Amino acid sequence: MTKSFLTRIAAVAAAFSLVATLAAPTAHAFPGDPGVAPTHAPLPTPNTDSCPYRSLPAPAVDESEVVQPGETTPTPLPVPATPVGGEQLAGCGVISDPAAGPLPDRLNAAGWLIADLESGRIIAAKDPHGRYRPASTIKVLLAIVALDELELDDPVEATPNDWSMEGDSCGMGPGGEYTVRDMLTGLLVVSGNDCANALARLLGGYDATLDKMNQKAADLGALDTRAASPSGLDAPGMSASPYDLAVLFRAAMRNETFRQMISMKTYQFPGYPKRKDVPGDVDHPSWTMGTSNTLLRDGWPGMLGGKTGYTDDALKTFVGAAERDGRAVVIVQVYGLNEMDNLFSTQAAKMFEYGFAAPESVSIGTLGSDHVDPATGETHSADGHNDDVSPRSAWTFGLLGVAAVCAALAALLWRKRRRGR
């Protein structure tokens, strides 16, 4: 998937309307911030005021989205006449409230969003409904579906299709003893594409899993989202927006199992016996895998968890949440890059700090607010959650206990996620 030096310059220059000297990307599909020598010169913030990604992501720079013979290019998802989350979110440039203070500098993601995780109030955003490739952040949606339908202790048998998957892997192999819990943890901690493939098989197969993922996205009001692969590897028609990724992550964080897994710095992933069909092979013991989330790995104060992503077409993506002094903030970054002295994770930390400092009254829109169904025109709640009441969130229930006034709501949320535990 690695492109030549000149191809990468041309692609990024066209997408960002800038000229920068770029080195070739890494061979991994979904690397986290390595914290070592960066690969990109300083970049100006991409200008999206003219809504270049309203309907579709930027053109692909490789052949990952070339349709197969006999197939057709997917039709772009319809753009809702009324922007989901509020009228202000119709804008494609930077949207903010002066009451929140000056925005962080040097945010090079083409699209981003900062919101209060609990209330859903959006604090600031850039191109919130622009359509971008999500890369591995789409695994959050796969996890939501899997937690709804699969039992954590059910066994999983690895197949050659699993261990031959492109990109990052947890190291599944023949004869290994795995469970759904292992698959989900590997999916979220190190972004294992082998785990994504195995989960898709358990959910009914590749196409059936995509149907379930896309139906779940629509049910949650993520109308810019189309999963075209369970893992996030680029494929024709793939898209998501900063708004949608925040909605999906917020929904996932209501599930206790997801919250536990996304917060893990390490996990002991099972090994497998030596392969008889490989001369000289030896046993493959279990190994301690570490999170691809740099802020979590490095102990950034208050980091609850997050999902990284990267492909040559998506560039760097991230969605995650952090908490400080009782306030939780969710951020999204899409179509960005590391810089020499400004890593993507450094930019994420700036966004979290901005969210923590913003007055709680600041709101340019709402995650999961009522929206108009593009097919029927019917107005309904995007995520089934009453944002007008601003109830305490599930993650706060776990920390502070349940007040009597919220008991009924807590029971409802418990029933909704029970099957995922």
Image (cartoon, rainbow, N blue to C red):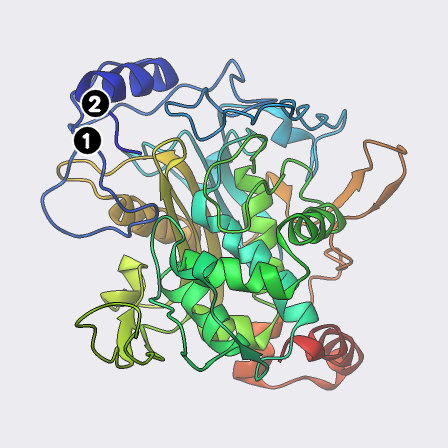
* Residue visible at 38% across and 69% down in the picture: 172
The kind of residue tagged 2 is Ser
Label 1: state its secondary structure: loop
The outermost residue toward the left is 37
Q: Position of residue 383 (x, y in %)?
A: 73, 54
Residue 24, numbered label: 1
Q: Position of residue 158 (x, y in %)?
A: 47, 69
* Residue visible at 59% across and 55% down in the picture: 141
Q: Which of the pair 188/334 is nearer the observer?
A: 188
Q: Which of the pair 195/415 is nearer the observer?
A: 195
Q: Which of the pair 100/145 is nearer the observer?
A: 145
For residue 270, side relative to residue 51 (left or right)? left
Q: Position of residue 222 (x, y in %)?
A: 67, 43
Is the C-beta separation of discs 1 and 2 under 8 Å?
yes
For residue 355, side relative to residue 142 (left or right)? left
Q: Quadrant of the C terminus?
A: bottom right
Quadrant of the image occupied by residue 324: bottom left
Spatial CA distance of label 1 from label 2 is 7 Å
Q: Which one is earlier in the sequence, the residue at label 1 or at label 2?
A: 2
The kind of residue tagged 1 is Ala
For residue 187, side relative to residue 207 (left or right)? left
Does residue 233 show up?
Answer: yes
Does residue 392 show up?
Answer: no
Label 2: state its secondary structure: loop
Q: Which residue is mark 2?
A: 4
Q: Quadrant of the N terminus?
A: top left
* Residue visible at 73% across and 45% down in the picture: 218
For residue 249, side relative to residue 271 (left or right)? right
Q: Position of residue 157 (x, y in %)?
A: 51, 74
